[in-house]
Image (cartoon, coloured by chain):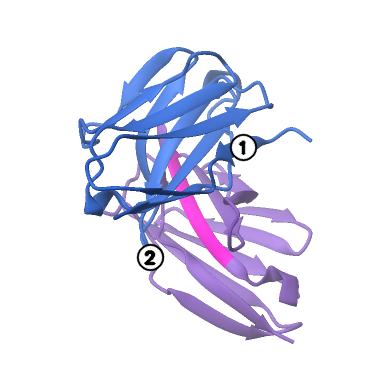
Chain colours: A purple, B blue
Amino acid sequence: DQQVKQNSPSLSVQEGRISILNCDYTNSMFDYFLWYKKYPAEGPTFLISISSIKDKNEDGRFTVFLNKSAKHLSLHIVPSQPGDSAVYFCAASANQFYFGTGTSLTVIP
Amino acid sequence: DAMVIQNPRYQVTQFGKPVTLSCSQTLNHNVMYWYQQKSSQAPKLLFHYYDKDFNNEADTPDNFQSRRPNTSFCFLDIRSPGLGDAAMYLCATSRDPAGTGGSYEQYFGPGTRLTVT
């Protein structure tokens, strides 16, 4: 049973606009959430994280929002750049990491 | 640069022929993980080592074994690969979770893509 879900397999955004990637989870025991970015032929690289005691964490152009009541996580990228084109995985942790299936973001120049 | 290295990047093996994938790290992390990722699916944890303590996921097939001879190296052995074992195998490391208050990330290698013919 998939405990972390990314329902949008792909997303296309114009350069300079906001990219919003979404993630839903089912396990209320998750206490730490992460976003990873993956380029082709490379392993996932850590992007940004958030603890369950917070509802927002910002790092430059990247902001992660956590809505615990809705069990929903989102990643905002503003402004989007062509180099942001990659697959984005969300992950949640409760003793071990559970990953979503990924969303492929394409930023169109 | 500190990193996680996986060799080979691409591996082709025959049905039923044992194969070993390797992972090494220069991060000096306590924990090492092996994930299996099939196309359009989420990475699935197979097992992990906390130092030398081996932790097997309940649904990891017996066909998969692992060895960690020292802190830096970890191996994934597939004893009799089947066609369904064709996948990307990702190795990852992390610091000791107990020292981070539960807030820690994993560092991944580039993966080994296994093809079974």
Residue B54, position in %: x, y? 37, 18
Q: Which mark is residue A84?
A: none
The magenta span reads A87-93
**Which chain is indicated by disc 1?**
B
Q: In which quarter of the image is residue B6?
A: top right
Whether A46 is drawn above or below A96: the answer is below
Residue B91, position in %: x, y? 50, 38
Residue A92 is covered by the magenta coloring: yes
Mark 2 lies on a secondary structure that is loop
Q: Nearer the viewer, residue B15 or A102?
A: B15
The residue depicted at 68 percent of the width and 27 percent of the height is B27
Can residue A94 be seen here? The reply is no
Sequence-wise, the earlier of marks 2 and 1 is 1
Whether A68 is drawn above or below A5: the answer is above
Whether A39 is drawn above or below B26: the answer is below
Name the residue that disc number 1 marks.
Answer: B5
Q: How crowded is mark 2: few (under 14 residues within 10 Å), some or many (20 or more)?
A: few
Name the residue that disc number 2 marks.
Answer: B40
Is the magenta region chiefly helix, strand or loop?
strand
Give the residue type that dot 2 points to.
Ser
The residue depicted at 46 percent of the width and 63 percent of the height is A102
